[in-house]
Structures are given as structure tokens and as C-alpha cells.
Image (cartoon, rainbow, N blue to C red):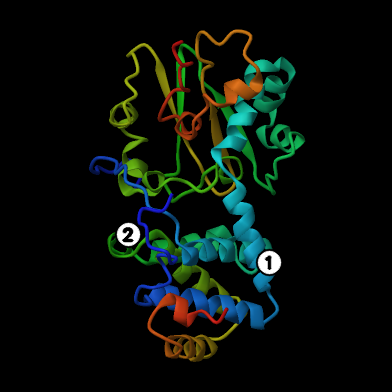
Amino acid sequence: MPHDHHPHRPDDDHALTYAQQMEIAVRELLIAKGVTTAAEITAQIAAMDARSPANGAAVVARAWTDRDFRAALLEDAAEASRAMGFDLGPLRLIAVENTAEVHNVIVCTLCSCYPRNLLGLPPDWYKSRAYRSRTVKEPRKVLSEFGLHLPEDVQVRVHDSTADMRYIVIPQRPAGTDGWSAKDLAALVTRDSMIGTAQAKAPPVL
Amino acid sequence: MGGLPAGVVPQDQHDFALWEKRVDALMVLGSGKGHFTVDGLRRVLEDMGADAFETMTYYERWIAAINQNLIEAGVYTTDELGRKMTEVAARGPTYGDACRD
């Protein structure tokens, strides 16, 4: 959601920065050279904008409700997600499952590798120096900053993503959701729960 | 970076600006068409040094890395880039003015 009530695109009416100037120049040169077209760039942005954690949530909810799908997802997450109709590109993807004994969290210490095809663009904190530096060294402390306090007897596994290998966390299915449909369950699956910095939401108390 | 001491994880989030989404699209399209690899981008980002992480934003670093890789791949020359940058800046003082579309 935009932070302001300004009617214009916020990046359109500030002084041109050097990086913006370069972006325009590079884009126009690539179009002039026939590498890409304006329409292709627009379509790529639209495709990226259309990706949201709802995609990942649908995958997780199906894994919670469909035993065969869960097995397929753990075997090859990219292939199983493709079979649900999600465009994974050439991405290799590993699904890691949280249990009562093991909690998984993903990071990219190098930069910003992220299961973007299922979750959309990564949040700013995922790309921050602090998250990338500390998650591999003191994951429990980092998770506690997100409000996730794990018992000492739960093992924490940190997965460092690369350009070639990305991860998505299958959070634990919340208690009190027996008999729920995959659609209803998906509403409990948040972005952060698939990164591993949160649990899936608890069902609302009636 | 992994394993180094650092401060509290910042939780603030900014909306992606149009130019940032365009940089992202150029990265995906350029690498998808084989003009550079993610490793090629990575090398430029690492060459920038630790300072760049403090002084430049994420997509500021990425457009610089994409540009460097495209020049090295021979897609266009430094001279062509220079002339285009000058042309873009001459269009007006804001991003909206400088975009031709």
C-alpha cells in the first residue's frame, strides 16, 4: 500500500537519481538493440507483481491436506509447484518441513535469493545486512526479534539459499484446524511462516 | 557477511518504485536471454566493496551490476551508455520527465 496520499507515482516526481538515469538508459539501449521490448518489460513487471505469498500459501495448504502432494513437494518442490500451475521457471526449490522437533528458517547470506516465484519479491529485512549476517550465527536471537521464541529442545535448521538452490518452509499446521479446507487453511499461511521467521497463524477464536 | 556481527534486523518496508521494478525486470530478462549470469552480477556486487552496501540501495547496486555485465558482454559500449545517459538527463529533472514513455 502506498504510504502517502500523493496522486502521482512517488518515484516520478522527485529529482532524477543517478541510478534512475542509468535504469532508463540501460532499458532504452536494450530495446534499441533488440534485446527486449517495452512490452516484454511491462509483462515481466506484471508477472512479478502478480506473485504473492498467496501462491506459496496455496502450496503449503495443499501439502497439509493432501498426503501424496506433500510427499511430492518434499521430493521436488519445484516440480510439485509447477504441477499446481505455478510458473517456477528453471528454479530449483527445496521444501523443508517444520515439525514439533525441528524449525527451519531460510536466508541468503550472499544477497537476496528467495523463492520469489511462490512468494513475490523478498521483504527489505530479508535483504538487510543484519538478517543475512546474523541468521546463520544466532538464529534463535534473530527469530526472537520477530517475536518467535522457540523452546530450547526445538532444533533450528538454517538454510542458506543460492541462485541455483532456493528453499521454502512448510510451517506446522496449526492446531484446531481438523477438517478445514485447503482454501481456509491457506489464509493461515503467512509470508513469514514460509520464510521461517514466524509460525502459521492460529485459527481465529470463535 | 554471513556470520559477521550486525545490529537488530530492521523491520521497516518500502514500496517498490517503478524504476526498481524495472531494474528487477531487466535483471530477469537479461539473464534469461543469456546476456549475463547471476554469478556475473554477483562478481560486480562483490567488487563494489562493503561501502557500497551502506551508501547504495539494493536496486542502485543491481542496475550498476547489470550495466557492467552488459558492457562486458558487448551488448552496448561505454560510449553508447554515456551518450544515452546524457540524453536521458537532458529530458527533465524528475524520473517522470526523463522517461520517454
State the image quarter where residue A97 is shown: top right
Q: In the drawing, does residue A97 fall left or right of residue B64?
A: right
Amino acid found under the numbered disc labelled 2 = Phe
Q: Chain of mark 1?
A: A
Residue ID at (58%, 80%): A28
Q: Is residue A136 above or below residue A103?
A: below
Amino acid found under the numbered disc labelled 1 = Glu
State the image quarter where residue A167 is shown: top right
- From the image, tell me which residue sits under label 1: A40
- From the image, tell me which residue sits under label 2: B53
Residue ID at (38%, 62%): A6
Q: Estimate how packed mark 1 is, as few (under 14), some (14 to 19) or many (20 or more) residues with alpha carbons within 10 Å.
A: some
Q: Estimate how packed mark 2 is, as few (under 14), some (14 to 19) or many (20 or more) residues with alpha carbons within 10 Å.
A: some
Q: Is residue A26 above or below residue B23?
A: below
Q: Where residue B7 sits in the image (x, y, percent)? A: 23, 43
Q: Element at badge 2?
A: helix
Q: Is residue A34 above or below residue A182?
A: below
Question: Can residue A88 be seen from the camera position used here?
Answer: yes
Q: In the drawing, does residue A121 fall left or right of residue A139?
A: right
Same chain, labels 1 and 2: no
Q: Where residue A130 sits in the image (x, y, percent)? A: 30, 44
Distance between mark 1 and mark 2 Cα atoms: 30 Å
